[in-house]
Image (cartoon, coloured by chain):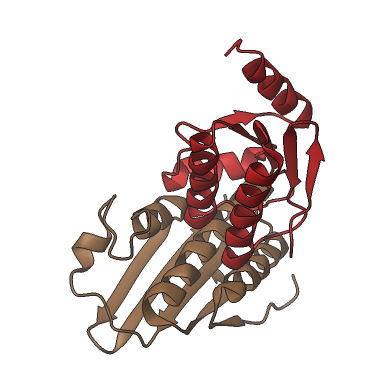
Amino acid sequence: MPVLQDIVVAIRSDGDIVAARQQGRSLAAAIGFTATDATLIATSISELARNIVLYAGQGEVMMRRVEVSHRKGIVICARDKGPGIRRIDDVLRDGYSTSGGLGLGLPGVKRLMDEFAIESELRQGTMVTVKKWLK
Amino acid sequence: MEVPILKQGRFLIATIQAALSDADLLQLRRALIDKVIHFRSNGVIIDVTALDVMDSFATRTLRDITNMIRLRGAGTVIVGIQPEVAFAMVQLGLTMEGVATALDLEEGLAHLQQRATGKI
């Protein structure tokens, strides 16, 4: 298996959302994910990158291959220095949205991936880290 | 990336050919509404076979297009949602309630023809 470099995609506008999810799909395929899982990963990246554009204006999506005791997978980290999230519990509830969107973003991403973590501080920014493991 | 829209009698066929940004999707919405009004179309097919991701924004925009076109008295059919894309949409919690879907262009046209002749 060749060494796969970290991929960082700067997110500044909606066009970058497409670039991020395409890079994510390529990396997922290189790691060995099925087409279905690669689609789940690309869709998650799309939602995370859109949150950056909508709420923070700009940020980045980092993705890399991970290997922990014979388990292989992908980790994706979406981070911004935006306004932060006041009530994290609310944004993790289905149907909640402050942007007039569908309110499915984060709970949906949580369902698509195997692991999900969010850190956010008001006026400092938000970081969402998700992982998916090869089955 | 502009989506080509073909006129076929009283139907319009929009074939998405590559990944679309949010701005591209909004452009498609504008172009379709304009053409439905201009040509007095009574049916629209949007072929999404080439889309490898349909996230919340794409789903919402396609649903908005369908609703707007319905208010003009015309029907819309979304054709070609890929199986992996359908799987991801359901997992994400996205539904296309109230939006007609069909397997491919042929079935989409058949649906619109039935609708135009009042069978559905």
Q: Is residue A34 visible?
A: no
Question: Does residue B111 appear to the left or right of B95 in the view shown?
Answer: right
Q: Position of residue A59 (x, y in %)?
A: 47, 84
Q: Is residue B5 above or below residue A90?
A: above
Q: Quadrant of residue B93?
A: top left
Instruction: Say which colour chain B has.
Output: red
Q: Is residue A67 visible?
A: yes
Question: Does residue A29 appear to the left or right of A17 in the view shown?
Answer: right
How many marks are shown on the rendered structure? 0
Asked whether B119 or B102 is in front, the reply is B119
Q: Is residue B86 above or below residue B4?
A: above
Q: Tell me what residue is drawn at x 37 percent, y 58 percent.
A: A101
Q: Tell me what residue is drawn at x 67 percent, y 37 percent.
A: B40
Instruction: Say which colour chain A has.
Output: brown
Q: Position of residue B18 (x, y in %)?
A: 75, 58
Q: Position of residue A67 (x, y in %)?
A: 56, 69
Q: Tell me what residue is drawn at x 55 percent, y 78 percent.
A: A13
Q: Is residue B103 above or below residue A38?
A: above
Q: List the single residue furthest toward the top.
A: B119
Quadrant where the C terminus of chain B is found in the figure: top right
Question: Does residue A108 appear to the left or right of B67 in the view shown?
Answer: left
Q: Tell me what residue is drawn at x 80 percent, y 44 percent.
A: B6
Quadrant where the N terminus of chain B is found in the figure: bottom right
Asked whether B57 or B44 is in front, the reply is B44
Q: Position of residue B94 (x, y in %)?
A: 45, 44
